[in-house]
Amino acid sequence: MNVTQLIIPELTLLAAAALLFLMGGSNAPKTRLLAPVVALLAMVGALVASLIGQRTGVRMDDTGSLAVTALSVYIKSISIGVGALFVLLAWPTSRDGASNRSISFSTETSEYFALLLLAITGMCVVASANSLPTLFLGIELASIPTYIMVTMSRPHQQAQEAGVKYFFLGALSAAMMLLGMSYLFGVTGEMRLDHIIDVLRRPADGPGIGGSLLMLAVLLMMMSFLFKLAAVPLHFYAGDVYQGAATPVTAAISFIPKIAGMTALIKLLYVAGAGTWALDPKLMKLVWIIAVLTMTVGNVLGLLQYNVKRVLAYSSIAHSGYLLVGLATLVHVKAPEQRGDALAAIAFYMLAYGVMNVAVFGVLMLLPAKVPAPARTAETYDDLAGAGWRHPVLGVVMALGCFSLIGIPATAGFFGKLYLLKPAIQSGNTALVWLAVLTMINAAISAGYYLKIVTAMWSKSDGAGTEAIRDTAHDSAYDLGHQAPATERSVPVLAAIALSAAGILAAGIVFPLTGAIYRAAASATAWLADGPR
């Protein structure tokens, strides 16, 4: 099949990104104000193209580098759909189109939205990748724009420092991935993922083909993908990067690299198991251990943070752990039906997590900071104090988002965790049952910091005091006599919050809709759960 027919969504996003880069050559305010409109229209067009192009079976291009499946269409659709919400969050509201209350583009408004489109394009490429070079291209295309977005998001030392840290650690991650891919190619002699599966499946070679070199290749690639997830022990950058970036960028980087990394990790383990998920027992144990460590470290460290964006950074780490719980279940169970349930749960949770995050970060964007620097919108518990009484709708949405992230019933997050735990408990495997128990304990731990956010929002305190513990390197940037400005009523941001809040509630209480989303996820992953194509 002609490659152009397979990548219409990607081509739509790339064309819009190229147009936005050209628009960046103009300093006219009207051009900057037009940039988010172009980005949003591109997202809508790409989503429509993705859904219209959905067909059964596996469709490959002539070289076999791309393979469009039901799973790749699902990943593309949720990536573009949630990506459209990120466009709304970053929508400029100043008259010259150079900023909104949370983010400062200066003269690079068009370039920012072009970079966002490129990152979403990278996620789509990862979803369809069927060769090692294409997978690498997709991962880096989803990652490199986010490094720039962090740095350019606000003119402050924290953002510059966060961007540099993120870039250099991302470069190390890319090096590990390339080294692992080189070993995998050296062992199998193949670049295409389906051909690698065929080589690993040959009876004469057996499941241990390549021995330690194959294991080394898988481990190196796995570590690189875990970095994108901010999974333990590759999580240390998350707190600084999430805090340093402007809030709309933090929302984007909590989702884009995570979904790209998780998709790539699923593909890697499918290939390593020769298309049957029959992994080396040591690798299976490693996935289990990393899942437990990631959600536990994320939740425990989240309790110790004083900056809300750092709290959400460690929350993001914990949610990576929950996704890895689904992956650990996937590689441990034997029955195709249970593998299908685990895959569908992962796919469902990807969408639920993206929607929940938009709601929480959107509310932070609309609440003012009580000190003017380094942020103009809420980032600390002190900023949130009493905000629910002053802005009750935002207070309710924040509570809804936090309850969903905990996994309280009547929310999308509840069903996300329920679907993740169901195959683990039903498997009868002792290790997986313990994994389910530890997941529930971690969900209870997470309630400590999520409810602290909600409590701060609805406290009677006027929040006039300063935060108990500050980053001393930036104390001088705070004007303690500053009075909090009125909450900005940004229609695009309000639309993103409303859509995400509606999604959280609808997926939590409208059971036919919840079932339909889960069935769509199950249908998208069914071919992968059944083993060999």
Image: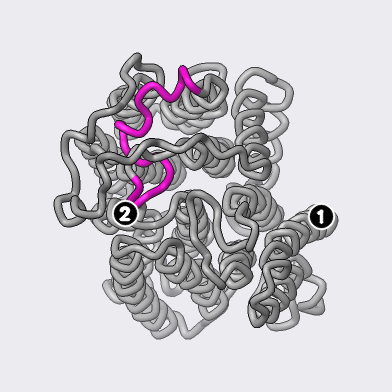
Q: Which quarter of the picture shows residue 461?
A: top left
The reply to whether residue 493 is visible in this rendering is yes
Residue at which label 1 appears? 48
Looking at the image, which residue is at 60% across and 36% down?
A: 497
Looking at the image, which residue is at 45% across and 74% down?
A: 204
Looking at the image, which residue is at 56% across and 67% down?
A: 112
Please, which residue is most extreme toward the right here?
52
The reply to whether residue 292 is visible in this rendering is no
Element type where label 2 sits in the image? helix
Percent position of residue 522, x then y? 65, 40
* Figure quadrant of the C terminus: bottom right
Amino acid at the residue labelled 1 = Val
Q: Is residue 385 magenta?
A: yes
Mark 1 and mark 2: Cα distance apart in space = 33 Å
Q: Bounds of the magenta span?
A: 372-390
Please, which residue is most extreme toward the top here?
460
Looking at the image, which residue is at 41% across and 47% down?
A: 376
Vertical position of residue 14 compared to residue 458: above or below: below
In this image, 388 relative to 472: left or right? right
Residue at which label 2 appears? 238
Q: CB under 8 Å between callouts 1 and 2?
A: no
Residues 272 and 140: in front is 140
Vertical position of residue 462 compared to residue 154: above or below: above
Q: Which comes sooner in the sequence, label 1 or label 2?
A: 1
